[in-house]
Amino acid sequence: MRWYQRFFHRKLTEKHFDAELRFHLEQQIADYIKAGMKPEDAWRRARLEFGGLDQVKEECRDVGSSHIIESLMQDLRYGLRILKRNPGFTIVAVLTLALGIGANTAIFSLIDVVLLKMLPVADPEQLVVLRWESPQAKTDSLPYPTFEQLRDNSYVFDGMIAFCNVGLATSVDGRPGLARGQLVSGSYFSVLGVPAIAGRTLTPKEDRVPGGDPVAVISYRYWKRQFGLDPGAIGKQVSLNGVAFTVIGVAAPGFDGISLSNIPDIWMPMMMQAQVMDGRSLLNDPKGWFFQIMARRKPGVRLEQAAASLNVAYQQIARQETGGRLTPQVERDLASQKIALLPASKGLSDVRERLSEPLLVLMALVGLVLLVACANVASLLLARASARQREVAVRAALGAGRARLIRQFLTETVLLAALGSLVGLLLAQYGDHLLLALPFMDGRPLVITVRPNGTVLVFTACVALLAAVLFGSAPAWTAARTDLNEALKASTRSVATGNQRSGWGRRKLVVIGEVSLSLLLLAAAGVFVHSLLKLRDVDPGFNQDKVLLVAIDPTLVGYRGDRLLNLYKHLANAISTLPGARSVGLSAVPPMSRGQWRTGVFVQRHVPGPNEDTTTPWNLIGPNFFRTLQIPLLQGRDFVPQDDSTAPRVAIINHAMARFYFGNDSAIGKRLSFTSSEGGEIEIVGVAGDTKYGSLRETAPHMLYLPYLQPPAGSMEFDVTVEIRTEGSPESLVGAVRQAIRGAARDVPILGFTSLAEQVNDSLAQERMVAELSSLFGLLALILASVGLYGLMTYTVARRTGEIGIRMALGARRAQILWMVLREALELVAIGVVIGIPLVVVFMRLISSQLYGITNGDPLTTCAAMAMEATIAAIASYIPAWRATKIDPIVALRYE
Amino acid sequence: MSEEKSEFLKGTLDMLILKVVALGPIHGYAVAQRIQQISRDFFLLQQGSLYPALHRLEDRGWLKAEWKATETGRDAKFYALTPKGRKQLETEVKNWEQLIDAVALILRTAE
């Protein structure tokens, strides 16, 4: 019979073995009887000679190739039987592992999407992003004419594409809505290699006539959301920012654009830019630094080669643009400019840059949780290995080899790990669901899909296997080293002695390790929470209480120029008359948001240093902005309604900027101008207090405020956030404000309401996420460690029942017994803590860049973590200790 | 019949079994009996070595097995030589003879 046949006919084979051996035995007996023995003697002799029946069978089974798979199946069956027989143990072990593995898988799935996943496009590793760099500034956005010339004059690329994002007010079948749009050059889809799943994508044909091709490709997501995957969507007319577009196709599912932070719903030809945006074309503007550029390297062209070739082309283009006015200064400027190529295989994403470090920290923490979980299961298994010594001894006596025994144990642990990872995968699914609902950044959840995919499954399998090795090898080894004679002799007593002590010693080590790791995790959680608390205490420079924010964007529905400014003036007035509104300001950039404006400025009589960043954050604000946010005005005057387009241009700068440019001189009356094309001088009329702009972590940046009625050319069309300081809670005014806006302009899209306090809070979303998750992990580790300690102490008390009985019989008081057990536990905890402290110190150093306002490793938090660890450990070991005092000496002595 | 007498030289057990089986289909017990008889009780074959060896030879395809009735009407597993087994036996016998010759040569010459 071949091995596979034998494999399938296992039962039959076993029976044949038996029959064959029985036949042998019977023949022998028959021969002995024939030789004149009495039947009983013959039987006994034959039996004696025959030796261990099972051993012969075992050795026969060991024969040949059939052995491996067959005995593996046998091990598996045996393992399952064992697990089924101990449901309590199995459930605890599987759940512990599932928590560890599930948490790891959940975090890893995020890392997979955010950090590892390649763009779902053809050959993503060939893609690069262009970044313009000069000593003063760098930007990923370039003018469209530059793009066209680079595209047409470089030979190292298989294609180059430009794109820019635009918010869309949509009207589909007469229903209004909002969507994220992206204007793209014609070869966008063909260069990326993204096909259409229905209809067609855009082509270079649509690159020719400005305004000529009002067609749109929608994303699969949007197709599903807006049209319910109806094929009838193709060919439909939709209104985008008031322009009629025809839907021509749906992009392949899974393609979410090339940036995690901006996932477009609708792609439109770049030639429609003027129509979709504001009536002014940026496509011919050499100063319209507005378009991101991506290129596909030709196969075999290295990044440096491509960059070198591209820069030669760029220098020529830039020289032509100066129109021959090449002064030495211009020459020097040009020579210092270059275009860098960044690999873009994973797409563009500031999400990636901002989340990578926190995610990696979380991954490390969650890995430690898994270690603690493994330690716990190892401890359980060690305890069980002691209990199973008799079984092991019997199997060894029956002829199972040591390797075979180890394998049996490993099979069981792998089985546990497999069960644990199955449950863990389910937990991870749920966990990712929760994680993605968390406001990740700026108060918005990430718009990403996390599905268990190949990478994640492989990761989980590896983690499970690693876990199995971690928690399974020590018990297996202990079990396999069982001394047969010792074990069989000892087996009549239920209390472990002899070499079982070695298992006991290992369990102690395991618990010490758990204590150290959980201390580390607790301290990590503590320090992240501490850092978050410190950030919350940071004074942002404005008063965040009782301020309602409402974002509106009239530019989406066609408000332009004076009509736009008048609308803003009108709205601010209308809202300020509302009862309950104490003061109303407005600004183009809302306080504490990520979307920053920066511009280059020349300040009168200031000569920039060679590497000085001449750009400064700036904002357009209404007259009551400072009063509403309660930002102090330190010098000069506030803006007034009369600071409009007919009045001289004025500016207010903040304290930091004033100090930087004017030192101790007064800034009032000084002048500055924008470095961009429009050149008018602006007079500084006031100095305001410093405020945080993008995040609470930063030191207050320079800030340049201009009156919103004097927007510089190039920033004429802007949306605003209206800030309203309210009498009562900000929420109470939402309805009234909505009505006021609707009353003033029925068609203006309201992008959203929030309160300033919430906005500030949202800016801490990332820190909060790390603090919350690390707290969760710390708690998990603490619980696991205390369960481990509890199990160990319970076992200790059982082991020492006899001894405790004797002590009590000799007159030991209960308090002494209690202390004896507690002391043993606390010694372990103390050792664990001592080992843990250096780990904490190293960890704090590693993550110091993630922390705010915490130096020198935060001894306070470390102490708090130690206290918590000790308290919980004391509670966990108090129960067994208390039980020890309840031991009845008489029963105990008999027990032994 | 002392302990050491019954020990098989390493590698010879398989050959002896093959040789015995080569005489015609035979069950395990008879193999042991036959070896014991032919060697005039020099080799005492224990089940602990016999059956693993039989199964090993079967697994390698040198023996094939069949359940058949014995002369007493009991079912027993009969082993028979396969062509592959016959070839193997020839090789082993040749090797063995060479070995014997070589050992004998050394013993003689060294005197």
Image (tube, helix red, strand yellow):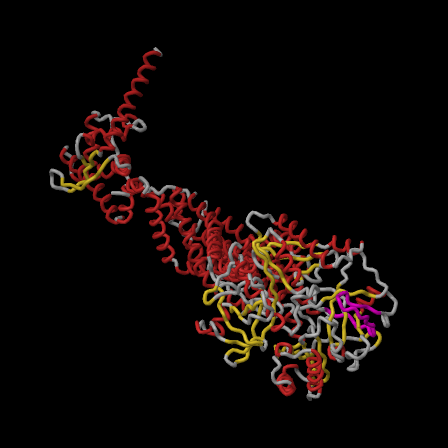
Q: Residue at x 53, y 63 (%)?
A: A203
Q: Where the N terminus of chain A falls, by quadrant?
A: top left
Q: Residue at x 14, y 32 (%)?
A: A35
- Residue A628 falls in which quadrant of the image? bottom right
Q: Position of residue A632 (x, y in %)?
A: 79, 75
Q: Position of residue A762 (x, y in %)?
A: 63, 70
Observer able to see residue A881: no
Observer able to see residue A214: yes
- Count of numbered badges drawn on the protein: 0
Relative vertical location of residue A25 with respect to residue A209 in this rendering, above or below: above
Magenta region, residue range: A671-692
Q: Nearer the viewer, residue A87 or A276?
A: A276
Q: Is residue B81 left or right of residue A493?
A: left
Q: Nearer the viewer, residue A40 or A53?
A: A53
Q: Position of residue A667 (x, y in %)?
A: 85, 70
Q: Is residue A683 magenta?
A: yes
Relative vertical location of residue A547 with respect to residue A198 in this rendering, above or below: below
Q: Is residue A359 left or right of residue A27?
A: right
- Residue A600 falls in which quadrant of the image? bottom right
Q: Position of residue A269 (x, y in %)?
A: 57, 67
Quick one: which residue is furthest to the right in this view?
A665
Q: Nearer the viewer, residue A307 or A790?
A: A307
Relative vertical location of residue A628 with respect to residue A817 in this rendering, above or below: below
Q: Is residue A527 magenta?
A: no
